Amino acid sequence: MYCTTRLLRYALCVINLIYALNGCLLIWYGTWLLDTIVEQPNPIDEGERMAAILCILLGSVIILASIFGTVALAKECKKMLISYAVLLLLLLVIQFIMFSISFSASRDALPESLRQGFDELWDTNSMRSNSTLNVYEEWLHCCGRNSAEDYIMLDREYPPSCCLQQDCTNPQNLFMDGCENKFKHYVSTKTANFHTLSWLLIIIEFVGSVATCYLVDSIRNHRDRVRFYN
């Protein structure tokens, strides 16, 4: 029984170390996301800034949780260990919710402003400039919803935002890719690292909570045996 308790303690020490390292990586990801926003402002930078701040906060909480777990292990305090197991489960739920939102955004979700720009593009009765879509075209280096051929189908001239440096006199400057696919690719590229980190954290939190519960039970059984034989 004592060997089992000692083995669980060693395993949880390793888990806490890996957990803290993943928390540091999450903080790095949030900082990197903020840096990319500063370098290249975009129409959805408020959403990205909020996501980056949440990642930094969550990473900080994860590091604090790993420290708390290490202290609980050192003291072999059952109440602290139970609290640590509950905290891991709570963080697991939060991590899973954030992952679900991020995964949905990377696959299907489009910002309302971009949807509005697409609606204005296909509105044949509207002759005014599509300023909403033009912002995304200039930012993502794209043209139309599906491709630059959208403007040909609608018998419209290419806006300057569809061309490199807004110079459409040279056909080679024309952006051929559609904005819908370009936006989804942009989001999926930004969230790929977060999805990997999220799965690692979810697995570690689940394994850590289960191992902690087993350790609490092992400590209780060991102490009961000591009291019984004494």
Image (spheres, rainbow, N blue to C red):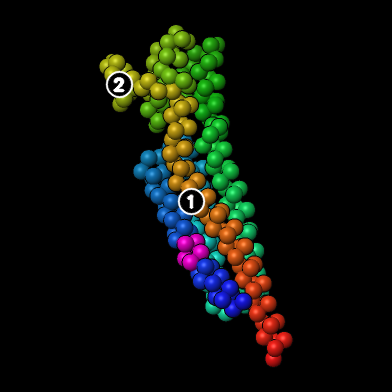
* Place of residue 86 in the rendered image (x, y in percent of width and height, measured from the top left): 65, 64
User: Going by the image, does 57 lie left or right of 77?
Assistant: left
Q: Residue at x 39, y 44 (%)?
A: 36
The residue lying furthest to the bottom in this view is 230
Residue 58 visible in the current orientation: no
Q: Which residue is mark 2?
A: 173
In the image, residue 201 sits, relative to residue 125, either above or below, namely below
Q: Is 116 colored magenta in this rendering? A: no
- Residue extent of the magenta highlight: 14-20
The residue lying furthest to the top in this view is 155
User: Going by the image, does 89 lie left or right of 19?
Assistant: right
Picture disc at residue 223 = none
In the image, residue 194 sits, relative to residue 182, either above or below, namely below
In the image, residue 230 sits, relative to residue 158, either above or below, namely below
Q: Which residue is mark 1?
A: 197
User: Going by the image, does 121 lie left or right of 90?
Assistant: left
Q: Residue at x 29, y 16 (%)?
A: 171
Element under disc 2: helix
Q: CA distance from mark 2 to mark 1?
A: 38 Å
* Place of residue 179 in the rendered image (x, y in percent of width and height, measured from the top left): 45, 26
* Place of residue 128 in the rendered image (x, y in percent of width and height, measured from the top left): 48, 16
Q: Residue at x 68, y 77 (%)?
A: 221
Q: Earlier in the sequence, mark 2 or mark 1?
A: 2
Q: Single out the mark in the foreground, 2 or 1.
A: 1
Q: Residues within 10 Å of mark 2 (few under 14, many from 20)?
A: some
What amino acid is labelled 1 in the image?
Leu
